[in-house]
Amino acid sequence: MPDNAEKRRWEDAKSAVLALLVVLSLVLSFGLWWSAAGPLKGEELWKQETPSLPPLPDWSRVVVPTRLLVHASGDRHLLFSMGSDGYREIWEGGCLRTGLLDGVGPPVTQPLRDAEVRALEGGMLLEARFATPLPGSLVARAYRMRGDVGDSVEALVFTPERWPYIAIRRAGQLYPLEGAAERDFRLLAQIVSRLASPGVMAPQGAIPLVSPALPEGWEASPGLWVPKAATVPRLVAGFVPPPGYGHTLVGQFFADPTVVRRIEERDGATIFTDGRSGLRVYPSGALEYNTPRPPPARGGIGAEAALSVALSFLATHGGIPSDMLLWGCWPVREEGGQAWALGMGLAAHGLVVLAPGGAVSLAVGDQGLYGYRAAAWLPWQETAGSHRIMPAQEALVRLAPRHPGRVLVEDMYLAYVGNPVVAGELRPTWVVRTGAALWAVDAVTGKVQSLEGRW
């Protein structure tokens, strides 16, 4: 019996130790789980890690003037296009690095009188003109200006000699910015004077400006000047969609690629959809993405917030090319709130490259982006040769049948316009702004099309 009793005691001791070890293991495991992670919720179990946002470009590289117009003594009127040495020296060296725009503003409430404008035009005048009038809040943020700059800005105007003004041009009139008189304009004046001298103009990329003759009954907005150019280099899209191009984009546009189905269309385009949002990939590589717009939550969104959303979207959906710029930003008033249509352009050979609505167009509401269209042109194809273009006056004659009666021509400039759906060569074009309308006149054939709306 003693042997049996001792055996039972030994078995009981082993069972107790084993039970203690099991309990201790459970306690330690539960403690580690609870203290390190906390109780997991359902959404956390399925939450995907948000990728870090690529760095966004400085707004002064996106909200950028496409032309510098210099009016110098001796009746010299010159254009410095994007990418030219003169453009970089004047804009970046004479205006931005010297901080001329930092903290100036807001504009005065009354524009300069005609006599005051004529006095300014008697000396040196530099005009940094945007491709279309932009919301003042975007220009102010891009260049660290102060106060409410206003609804739209056509250009920034500098008069660095007798009367040191900085003004904004709105609807053809000049509104001086407060605080500009205290700035040092000497470096800008020296740069512009040197670049406008006859021996330096051409090597620095200067193009003569002329005042165009208008069709009968038409009027020119103050400051309407066009480049005197006879030829424009050829520009050909160089992007060729690789095999499976559309499939590589599904992960960028859809949170759950496993539910996405594909639809092949007769025109060669491919549609990817998850039943809610849709991505259309054209044979040329152009993209169209749409998602249902939720009802406005706050009644609208400001231009600054809309551009921020657009840039963030572009950065995470293919990136932002270094030569991309803001071409236009227009309010879209809909029932229940306000959204924005943003058009981006590209720069090539000193000109802006466009499609109707922009080479890239985005629609942004207060709940985020709900529309996106993008041409696939980059990189440009290396090519030689040039197009001989018609004078601006002839282009206006071609446009005249679209505008019977009196018309105010507010701006006119050369650009490239292409069809994103059809790959190939882009066309040299005269862009004409008449009030709220934007027209493109092919500078070779004279064909007229609207640049508004969608391609």
Image (spheres, rainbow, N blue to C red):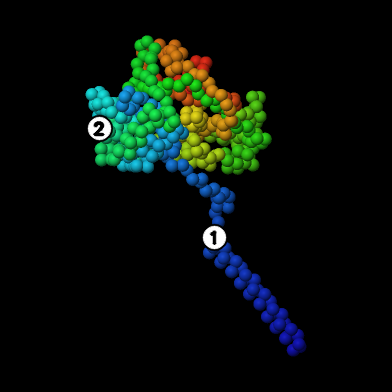
Residue 37 pos. (x, y %): 54, 60
Q: Is residue 25 left or right of residue 345?
A: right
Q: Amino acid at mark 1?
A: Ala
Residue 39 pos. (x, y %): 54, 59
Residue for point 37% across, 42% down = 97
Residue placed under numbered mark 2 in the picture: 162
Assign a secondary structure to mark 2: loop
Residue for point 44% across, 38% down = 61
Hey, which residue is sitting farthest front in the picture?
A: 199
Residue 315 shows up from this direction? yes
Chain-order first, disc 2 or disc 1: 1
Residue for point 64% across, 37% down = 247
Residue placed under numbered mark 1 in the picture: 37
Q: Amino acid at mark 2?
A: Arg
Q: Quadrant of the N terminus?
A: bottom right
Assign a secondary structure to mark 1: helix
Residue 111 pos. (x, y %): 26, 28
Circle 1 packing at 10 Å, graded few (<14), some (14-19), many (20+), is few
Residue 288 location, quadrant: top right
Comparing 5 with 413, the one in front is: 413
Q: What is the CA distance from the residue labelled 2 to the residue labelled 1?
A: 69 Å
